Image: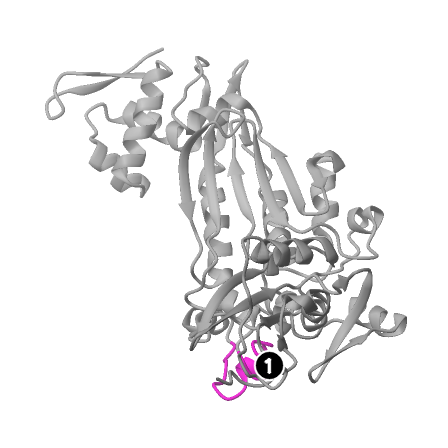
């Protein structure tokens, strides 16, 4: 049976006796298109002749790919039955161009693998065409209602005939690319925002999912969540009232937007935010770009990993092309908040103080005068009307009854208020 023809993204090998050549083909096709399929047990003309498969055959293929393709990729390897013949299918994708095989670089041309010259290699490494644009989305059934609404809010219209090309949502072959995937109404990426009790990940309190939707919508939802948590702490010291935010809002915003913009989406892992009792960690996948130093990074010299995504975020006023994000964070907290490795960039924003953070989690310290703005408002309303109900407090403050109940629980633990009598006929007491 014939299964097709070799192309710039499909390669056939008669057997694993040509394993080295197959590994070279994988790197070659990844350098050209970012994805590929390699078949063992198929002749060059597409005739399936079968591949003998032993106990270690698939492992040998996997190890060869892991050992001799750099940067490392994780392929999908499976056995398929074509009529009466077993063949091996290897599928791979990646956006960390350029890929080397056995220490050399290759580029696909038609159905051939050609070694790349140093000048072409440099051109590949520093071209503005990011992996977001060149890699084909696994899902081609995409819609963009949410993205259209974001543009409409800015008074901009996306025309059916042109917006996919104008926003670089298509590969050169006309298929939806990875950027189309992350901006679509429904996608496979889940952004997680988790809150932990204490200073490590031993005890998870809450985990919110902001993914599976247009990335730009999810970005806003995370910012809104952080803003809701970032309550003002009111501290009375010597009769003076001092208000302090739990963390710097602008620093968090810049760290989060940078994490989304510069994330290596080809790794199939979105950025994440973790709240602890003493800090916030914003984690993105992928280190610094090639030929980009730490001094470049801290100086705010912009070198976007995903240039096309940056253009959209600028159009919608998510970011500015000024490169001020990192210098702003450094000015607030210093360089020490950045942890940069080959595979991750983590920004750690310290919280104002541990007691305030724990009070948000209903783990209250004995301090009596550290109140959030909401707690102070409830205390003021109770002082004015000792018979006020939770429903009335909810209505006046425009927050949920659950939020009111949680704040009241904190005020009781701080020994600021108490309740006497029944829910209907009772009243509040202000404790000094």
Q: Is residue 159 magenta?
A: yes
> Could you say which quadrant of the image residue 429 lies in?
top left
Q: Residue at x 66, y 46 (%)?
A: 344
* 5 part of magenta stretch: no
Residue under numbered circle 1:
166
Q: Nearer the viewer, residue 18 or 161?
A: 18
- Point out residue 250 in the picture as x, y percentages from the top left corner: 61, 45
Residue sticking out furthest to the right: 118
Q: Which residue is at 65% across, 74% downward?
A: 33
Q: Which residues are magenta?
A: 156-175
* Residue 264 visible somewhere in the drawing: no
Along the horizontal axis of the image, is 65 left or right of 191? right
Residue 242: quarter of image:
top right
Q: Quadrant of residue 396?
A: top left
Q: Looking at the picture, tell me which residue is in the foreground, 133 or 78.
A: 78
The residue at 24%/26% (across/down) is 385
Residue nearest the viewer, comparing 230 with 210: 210
Q: Residue furthest bottom?
A: 161
Residue at the extreme top of the image, as rendered: 432
Q: Position of residue 1 (x, y in %)?
A: 48, 84
Give percent across and percent down for residue 62: 62, 56
Q: Secondary structure at mark 1?
A: helix
Magenta residues, dominant SS class:
loop
Label 1 neighbourhood size at 10 Å, few (<14), some (14-19), many (20+)? few
Question: For the point 70% across and 85% down, which residue is it?
Answer: 110
User: How many numbered marks appear?
Assistant: 1
Instruction: Residue 392: give x, y in percent of width and height.
Output: 22, 36
């Amino acid at each position: 049976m014939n299964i097709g023809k070799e192309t710039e993204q499909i390669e056939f090998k008669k057997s694993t006796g040509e394993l080295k050549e197959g590994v070279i083909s994988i790197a070659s096709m990844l350098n050209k298109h970012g994805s590929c399929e390699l078949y063992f047990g198929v002749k060059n003309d597409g005739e399936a002749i079968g591949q003998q498969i032993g106990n270690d055959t698939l492992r040998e293929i996997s190890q060869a790919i892991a050992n001799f393709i750099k940067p490392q990729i994780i392929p999908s390897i499976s056995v398929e039955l074509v009529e009466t013949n077993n063949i091996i299918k290897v599928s791979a994708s990646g956006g960390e161009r350029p890929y080397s095989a056995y220490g050399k670089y290759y580029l696909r041309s038609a159905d051939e693998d050609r070694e790349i010259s140093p000048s072409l290699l440099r051109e590949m490494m520093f071209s503005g065409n990011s992996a977001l644009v060149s890699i084909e989305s696994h899902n081609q059934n995409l819609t963009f209602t949410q993205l259209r609404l974001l543009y409409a809010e800015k008074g901009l219209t996306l025309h059916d005939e042109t917006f996919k090309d104008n926003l670089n949502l298509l590969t050169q072959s006309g298929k939806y690319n990875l950027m189309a995937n992350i901006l679509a109404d429904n996608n496979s990426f889940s952004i997680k925002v988790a809150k932990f009790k204490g200073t490590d990940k031993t005890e998870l309190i809450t985990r919110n999912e902001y993914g599976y939707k247009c990335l730009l919508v999810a970005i806003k939802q995370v910012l809104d969540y952080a803003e809701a948590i970032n309550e003002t702490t009111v501290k009375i010291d010597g009769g003076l009232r001092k208000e302090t935010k739990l963390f710097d809002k602008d620093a968090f915003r810049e760290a989060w937007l940078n994490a989304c913009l510069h994330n290596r989406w080809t790794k199939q892992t979105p950025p994440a935010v973790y709240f602890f009792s003493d800090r916030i960690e914003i984690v993105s996948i992928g280190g610094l770009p090639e030929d980009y130093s730490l001094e470049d990074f801290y100086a705010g010299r912009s070198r976007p990993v995903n240039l096309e995504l940056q253009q959209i975020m600028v159009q919608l006023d998510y970011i500015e092309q000024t490169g001020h994000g990192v210098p702003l964070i450094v000015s607030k907290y210093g360089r020490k908040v950045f942890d940069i490795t080959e595979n991750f960039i983590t920004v750690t924003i310290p919280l104002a103080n541990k007691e305030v953070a724990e009070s948000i989690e209903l783990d209250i310290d004995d301090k009596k005068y550290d109140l959030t703005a909401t707690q102070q408002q409830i205390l003021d309303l109770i002082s004015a009307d000792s018979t006020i109900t939770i429903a009335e407090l909810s209505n006046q403050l425009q927050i949920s009854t659950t939020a009111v109940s949680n704040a009241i629980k904190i005020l009781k633990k701080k020994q600021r208020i108490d309740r006497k009598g029944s829910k209907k006929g009772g009243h509040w007491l202000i404790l000094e």
